[in-house]
Image: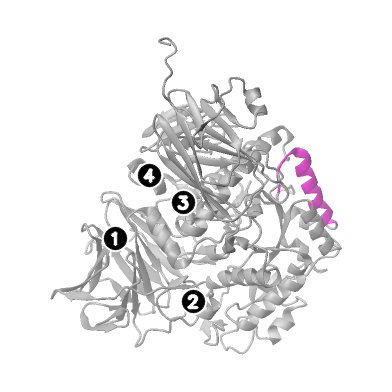
Amino acid sequence: MIICKKLLEIRNGDGRLDLITDAAKFRIVLLTDEIVRIRCTFEEHFPEEASYSLAMTAWEDKMDALMPDRRKIEAIPAQYDDWGTHLLLTTRTLRIRINKEPFAIEITDTDGNVLHADLKEKSYVRDAQGRLYHYSCMDDHDHYYGFGEKSGYLNKKNRRMRMHNVDTIGYDSELTDPLYKHIPFFIKFNGESQTASGLFYHNSHDSVFDIGCERSGYWNKYSYFCADGGELDVFFIYGPRIKDVVRHYTDLTGKTVLPPKYSLGYMGSTMYYTELDRHSDKAILGFLEKCREEGIPCDGFFLSSGYTTGKDGKRYVFHWNDERFPDPKRFALQMAEMGAALAPNVKPGMLVTNPLYREFDEAGAYIKDSSGERSHIDRFWGGAASFVDFTNPEGRALWKKHLKQSLISLGITSIWNDNNEYEINDSRALCHCEGDPKPIDGLRPIMPNLMAQMAKEALEETSPGVRPYIVNRAGFAGIQRYAQTWAGDNITSWKSLKFNIPVMLGMGLSGVANQGCDIGGFFGPAPDPELFVRWVQNGIFQPRFSIHSCNTDNTVTEPWMYPAYTRYIRDAIQLRYRLMPYFYSLMFEASTEGSPIMRPLVYEFQNDARVWDESFDFMLGSSILVANVLEEGAKTRAVYLPKGADWVEWNTRKRYAGGQTIHLDVSIDSIPMFLRSGAVVPMAPGLTNIHKDTAERLQLLIEPSEEGGFVLYDDDGRSNRCKEGDYLRTTITVKNGRDTRISFTHEGEYRARLQTMVVEALCRDAAPVQVSLRDKELSMFLDPKQWDAAEEGWYYDMEQKAAKIKYNDRREDYEIRINFDVKDLISI
């Protein structure tokens, strides 16, 4: 056991501070005012900078050419004061104290709140097996969030979690660990000081987080990170708010890529259709036609791997089964004509019987065995296989070649990367690693990220004007830069419905805003009617919304599987489509700010202690609280409404003060939703297909009792012209009072086909007496039919307690004024 105990030497480098201790070397880089890099190695020299995951650096890196979107910044000079017992470095927001003996690092804010403290005398350790440990102090008021894709409750305090990619079919969403993603990042929030910070361990070896499970009477309470290899490369990230930590973390590892708009629609899927003996294409086209007949919007279909099945029943990537799909190009065209994207499944494990196996083998494109001379063969779904090495230029080139030939050439612009956990059992198997071979055990979670990057590049090289849509099952930190993700092969149960929510909330706090789970459950018997309805009612709020199944009772999960309940499924999906402008704007926010779309309540209300451990109720963006019914046979639903806002029930428009628990009566059609005071929610009534429909009417639901605002974003939804200014960003600002003002400012060149705007302003105490647009008084109507027939004007909806204001859309900046002075009819 080697432990760093004493600082021996200090060296100022170029934009860094190098420290030599009695056991290891350290390099401190003040990357920004909020991000501090603490790099530790127990070797003679620091390894070469070679990161596949960082999106922002202040140094030269071997992978810079492979990461074209990487942003280079200049680090803050690492100047320090020597106080005898310790060194002190400062940024605008942080104080970094380096204790000389015992060696330890402590970081505080400018008010003296301790944000991070190494456990003195046991801070940085390497054991006899080469495992690396970093021990940190814990406080009784600390809460821990994030850690990527993890089961169980939102707050991970008193948990031990393993970081490792694994195919966990039928997992228990409360207890199973690990799952598919490996994201070694967490947020620590101290309730007493109201400060949040994060630690990102830039290490892709298998690792463990112990958040207070281990105890020793000789030490203060502590947590630790343990990695099987590599180096302790730690990025400390400051808030002080949780949302600030997420923003800075996604500066470091990348923002969520803006996907094509249709990817936010309902994506149909099931393994059942592609396992039919023949005519799977007709079954899928029939599914789309049935959606149309039932009034259920649908914008795409995830094509399960049965389409690749060979004569021997094995799945062969880049192969089409001609009995199930006799004319793939015509099929893809028919799908497009019906307003549905096709997203075919591809897998990086290539069975040794695959007709393409030899081509990849001869090119040296697979991961090698420990000798480095032969392709490594391991267990995979379907039999013995070798795995494409995406750290090898040959592997990347061949993969892109066959993506283009087999799929993209058919007009396909969506790729579904599956079974890419790289469960290679020999940790000595060698990856090319850009000409510097390294064992798979340090690169396993990097492979799915590179696989997604290659799909993105292949699509952009073939169709440079089209925005790619990539979906990944596995991934490492930074996967959000390339792909939407989902929580793998969940089991069909009420527990999965419930505990998949904190799984997704944790992913959102870990930088992955665009994700979801299989609605209805993937593995197990078909869901019963009540469970299915409740799952869809929850699923419509997930960025990835797909009903997908591999049922074990010879059934297929479809929206109309229970005819007596289809209307509830239809209503829920139609609600999802009405909210599409809100969803797309939130996705834009994720792409620029890193914000989650599904947000735990603590993200928006971290000063309310009652939400610090809330795992199941969540915010959709900043404006809508969702409290889905998650219990079988429920007749009532208790909902805690966070303090710091008023809340308006979505359907009844009943108003509640925050800071209280209310009890709602619920029925099978209930989707409990609450509008936050100051909220702005854009909606598109009547939208049924994102590919084909043109939204000519936009509805803005506004709660103006508090100041608020929203950035409404739009573009063509399918091209990359938005990067050249062809977008429309409308900033909506609400200033409340008896003379409420709603202002609209525009940026960008995109010309939408929008014709009519309807602003629905909720009224707290009284109806307006006057409404004006650009200082021009609008006509007031008593009869809603007359208002509906008019081009512009307003009326007061008594039932909805809202002023409904209609006018022709206008591109110039403007303001709506709503006067709430009470008109005295008696004295007149």
Foreground mark, 3 or 4, reads 4
Answer left or right for 657 relative to 775: left
Callout 1: few (<14), some (14-19), or many (20+) C-alpha neighbours within 10 Å? few
The alpha-carbon separation of the residues under discs 3 and 4 comes to 21 Å
Q: Quadrant of residue 822?
A: top left
Q: Residues within 10 Å of mark 4 (few under 14, many from 20)?
A: some
Asked if residue 629 can be seen in this view, the reply is no
**Any mark on residue 442, and which?**
2
Residue at 50%, 56% in the rendered image: 590
Q: Are marks 2 and 3 in contact (CB under 8 Å)?
A: no
* Foreground label between 2 and 1: 2
Image quarter in which the C terminus is found: top left
Q: Nearer the viewer, mark 1 or mark 3?
A: 3
Q: Amino acid at mark 3?
A: Gly
Q: What residue is shown with label 3?
A: 152
Residue of label 4: 605
Which of disc 3 and disc 1 is earlier in sequence? 3
